[in-house]
Amino acid sequence: MTRTEAEDPSAKETVRHAPANRPWTVRRLGSLLAPALIFLGIRELGLLVLTWMASRNLHSVSEALRSWDGQWFLAIAGGGYSGVPVGLVDAFGHRSVETPLAFFPGYPMVVRWFAAIDGPHGIGLVSSALTVTIVSGVFCSYGLARMGTRIRGGSRQAGLILVALFAAAPMSIVLSMAYSEAMFCAFAVWALVGVLERKWLLAGVCCTLAGLVRSTGAALVLALCVAVLLAIVARRDGWRPWVGALVAPVGLIGYLAWVGVRTGEWNGWFALQERGWGTGFDGGAATVRFSLDALADARSVLEVATVWFLLLAIALVVIMIVQRVEWPLIVYAAGVLAMDLASNGLMNSKARLVLPAFTLLVPVALGLAERRPATFVTVLCGLAVASSWFGAYALTSWGYAI
């Protein structure tokens, strides 16, 4: 003990808490903002490439960012499920009163709330939707950075690389569109952070909110249940895991039940998907046929690339198991991928539908974190440019739904 500490016992406490009062230096501020800056920087690159390709292909950037499912989300945000214009139809050109119920309410509800903040003549639904998407992406980036420090073998650097990989993932263009992926991923990553940190209420609440945004919430519920089972077997945290498990499925089950009541069918939401978009579970037979056909005649960049993305995703699940990544993260990624592969319907959407399986990027992030900065920066820059072009191609050159 120093003389100062001996004379004044409170001096030791002052020294101990001094870092909390350190000034806001540029370096400290940069460290705090790093996840957001990395995410926004890569997404801005994607928008710049989209702007260039849109001008070359005589497309409107604004229309591209609210195309396809974005039109449905904006219509639901504007008038609710009963106020969707009759001009919006399903994949077969049909429309019924129940058709809009195929889209989960979480994202359009928040878009509507945000647009109403400054009155009926404020920022408008499109600006609100794009703002909600970007803000959700930023929240997701901080969750990914946190996850990178909590996983086995993780570090601050691995977390930031994970953010960059997510922002530069194939079809990450939807993280800048009026789509619900960014919001879902934000809730999902914080649910998984709650699992890793054994904050069961956080995990359960984020899980139930994710279940109000996308059907992929089923994979998140499964991952949380696996984590709860492991905690119970290990006799950790007492009653808290049970609370997380009880709260987790409320959002997803609640919405599916509500659609069932509205449609008069116990499997109402699934029936809507089958009738309107030809989407159901066939064990992967349609995906296999699509993959073989796409590789055989290579009729488009998007279809061939989609097949390779799916094969890479399967390989990453295997790598996660070999590297002994935490089981809830493996179960979540495998669940999202299984839901994508085992369904028929719109094959061109499969690259987008695997985007929420961001935990597949964990082994890649850990591997790059062990390399020299020049190496992983070069790889990440290359991926950012490639994904920016691919996303812009999907919106401006590919003529079908994504």
Image (spheres, grey):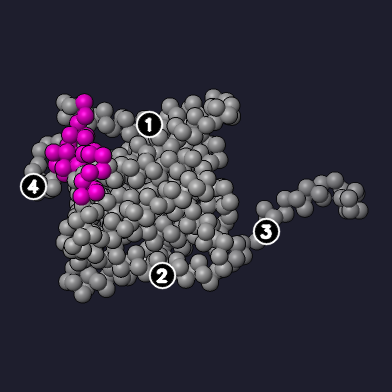
Mark 3 or 4, closer to the camera:
4
Q: Are marks 1 and 3 in contact (CB under 8 Å)?
A: no
Q: Dot 3: what SS?
A: loop
Q: Quadrant of the C terminus?
A: bottom left
Q: Is residue 139 visible?
A: no
Residue 10, above or below 295:
above
Mark 1 burial class by Cα count in 10 Å: few <14, some 14-19, many 20+? many
Q: Which mark sits nearer the N-terminus, 2 or 1?
A: 1
The CA span between labels 3 and 4 is: 62 Å
Q: Nearer the viewer, mark 1 or mark 3?
A: 1
Q: Nearer the viewer, residue 357 or 310?
A: 310
Residue 21 coordinates in the image, percent (x, y):
68, 55
Q: Quadrant of residue 397?
A: bottom left
Judge the density around disc 4: few (<14), some (14-19), many (≥20) Cα neighbours within 10 Å: few
Distance in Å between CA atoms under marks 1 and 3: 43 Å
Spot occupied by residue 333 in the image (x, y as percentages of width and height) = 40, 45
Sequence-wise first label, 1 or 3:
3
Q: Is residue 287 magenta?
A: yes
Residue ID for mark 3: 22
Q: Residue at x 24, y 54 (%)?
A: 291
Which one is closest to the eye, mark 4 or mark 2?
Answer: 2
The amino acid type, in three-letter code, at marker 3 is Arg
Say whether residue 114 is left or right of residue 374.
left
State the residue at coordinates (46%, 43%): 329
Residue displayed at 34% across by 64% down:
387
Q: Which portion, as a residue range, is magenta?
A: 266-289
Cβ–Cβ below 8 Å for labels 2 and 1? no
**Closer mark to the observer between disc 2 and disc 1:** 2
Q: CA distance from mark 4 to mark 2?
A: 40 Å
Tag 4 secondary structure:
loop
Which residue is rendered at x = 22% and y = 39% of the image?
282
- Determine which residue is flagged by label 2: 382
